[in-house]
Amino acid sequence: MIRVALDAMGGDDAPRVEVEGAVHALREFPATFRIQLVGRTRDIEAALKTHGTVERDRLEIIEAPEVVGMGEKPLAAVKGKPRSSIAVGIGLQKQGASDAFISAGNTGAVMAAATLLLRLHEGVQRAAIGALFPTAVHPVLVLDGGANVDCDARELVGFAHLGSVYVRDVLDRPQPGVSLLNVGEEDEKGNAVVKEAHQLLKQTPGIRYVGNVEGRDILAGQCKRGRIDVVVCDGFVGNVVLKFYESAGRMFMGMMTQAFPDVLGRPETQQLFKFLDYSEYGGAPLLGVKGVVFICHGASPSRAIKNAVRVAAQMVASHLNQDIGAELAEGGAPR
Amino acid sequence: MIRVALDAMGGDDAPRVEVEGAVHALREFPATFRIQLVGRTRDIEAALKTHGTVERDRLEIIEAPEVVGMGEKPLAAVKGKPRSSIAVGIGLQKQGASDAFISAGNTGAVMAAATLLLRLHEGVQRAAIGALFPTAVHPVLVLDGGANVDCDARELVGFAHLGSVYVRDVLDRPQPGVSLLNVGEEDEKGNAVVKEAHQLLKQTPGIRYVGNVEGRDILAGQCKRGRIDVVVCDGFVGNVVLKFYESAGRMFMGMMTQAFPDVLGRPETQQLFKFLDYSEYGGAPLLGVKGVVFICHGASPSRAIKNAVRVAAQMVASHLNQDIGAELAEGGAPR
């Protein structure tokens, strides 16, 4: 039975949303996992009371009296609050008492705690955020989504490995196509770091590298040299494009809704644009740490939390962590 | 009378599209300008024949027997083909025989020729491409859109000046809000270059700096600290986001068209999404050179060429070039 620890104190409306997400996950998904709600027991119990019958033998409460605020400095918060829901939740995994950790709280603090407590895989310099971009074809994993604003070429090669294993294990695509985000497809395009990464990726064993791609290729899910499952970039450009995409979706939908309320109300429209709903994906994996850590948006609705539980359980079930360790050891960890 | 030189040999379907764009510009816009079609006279004359009566006293043909191909190395092409339509067209401006140059040809070659022949304004290290992003509110100028993949902080400050003057002069907005693209709004966010640029911009006279903005703020056209007219970023991220946006628009429209052909056929839908049509803006100004240079997409339809003529004439009429010179001299050119 997979044990998924969930930071009950993380999001903007915690613990209400987290508890609701946990309850729905237990009700709707197959019983392959149990949930460990980490936070202030009294607040969690109060939130649980509003939900009627809950399968309590699959739901445990782990007391953590401290809470890390959204605005707190990550490292200081992690060190200064050892009994926070983030530190306690990740600590469970370190002790072997849990298999995964989910939080909609302070992302920097989750990263810091995961890096300090779980450590990084060999060859990984910093953990990366894997952002799943919905497209009209298949979701494409863009990483780094914002954890590393300055990257060298070897870090980008590391992201290629991390993304490749994630897509293979969790999205169940056997031979993921990995691309490098650039301003053109030719060898000589890009800044110094990207040019070097392009040359390294061409020679990296274990990676099906399809080459440089441009901003327009991400949503196409393919380029001239094949299918794109993973897009590698530094966390600065990844973060900008990710946030830009969310806003573009909102803008288009907003304009359509205003102009054609009749059309947007139709069930087939809801269905058509369901792929754009980020809560479908739950959030984003933090890749590179020795363990399973999943990050949700602070404003996540309970549906996102519920789906995060599903994805985190998949990450554990597919042995993602072990496979990443093996890939980096065998396939040429970037040194 | 403003003299606009148009590279007749530039785009994917030259000179047909260029000649058609020129003819339509002469017919549709007020007679404040004349057009100089630069290229192979015989080919241009042949294309002109298909258009019936053309106001020939406002249309001149300037012979340029050589053509720079899309795949040619910019600097080598400019130096090796002094009689190309690009070199001749920009040369006219140098000689005082023309006021503006438009090309849908090899962008790198246009940049190289403009930099070599016209030179850069004091304090500008490299010319930048100003990409106008359509939004549901007002178009937002993002620069650099792809000319400079590696930028230092002072170059970013230079882009702030260039964008600010462009928006003031050509878009007629008196006090443009200038923002810096980043991964968060706080002072400590971003990579080293962006952090330094943020501090510099806060102290730059003549710039109404509204601070760091995120990817999601571009299309909103505003952030907490005010309206956004200009978004400053390096050419790598600018190019990625620009191309991504074009593809996102296509994806949304494609999905809607497939699902609701009835709705998409409605005239009000066409009107609603007209703002997304890039040919409305014609292309992008090349800013920082001493002169007026406007770049069109290689696949531009004649409508884009036509609108490029309109915008280039506006750039001349508003004294953009002189105003940029004055801004950089007075307002603290980045040194």
Image (spheres, coloured by chain):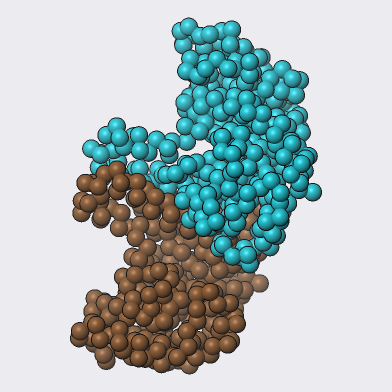
Chain colours: A cyan, B brown
Relative to B261, residue B206 above or below: below
At which x and y percent is residue A326?
A: 74, 36
Up-down relation of residue A68 to residue A55 (above or below): below
- Left or right: A210, with B31 as reference point: right
**In terms of depth relative to the viewer, which is nearer, B57 or B49?**
B49
Is A124 on the left-hand or right-hand side of B131? right
Residue drawn at the location 64% of the way across and 39% of the way down: A165
Q: In this view, does B301 lie to the left or right of B103?
A: left
Residue under the point 50% across and 68% down? B129
The N terminus of chain A appears in which quarter of the rendering? top right
Residue at the spot x=60%, y=15% of the render?
A: A34
x, y percent for residue B287: 50, 73
Q: For residue A260, which quarter of the picture? A: top left
Residue closest to the eye, A225 or B228: A225
Q: Which residue is drawn at the image coordinates 47% and 70% (left, top)? A: B165
| Relative depth, front residue between A99 and B4 | A99
Residue A307 in view in this figure: yes
Vertical placement of A199 versus A251: above or below? below
Whole-percent x and y of residue B69?
50, 78
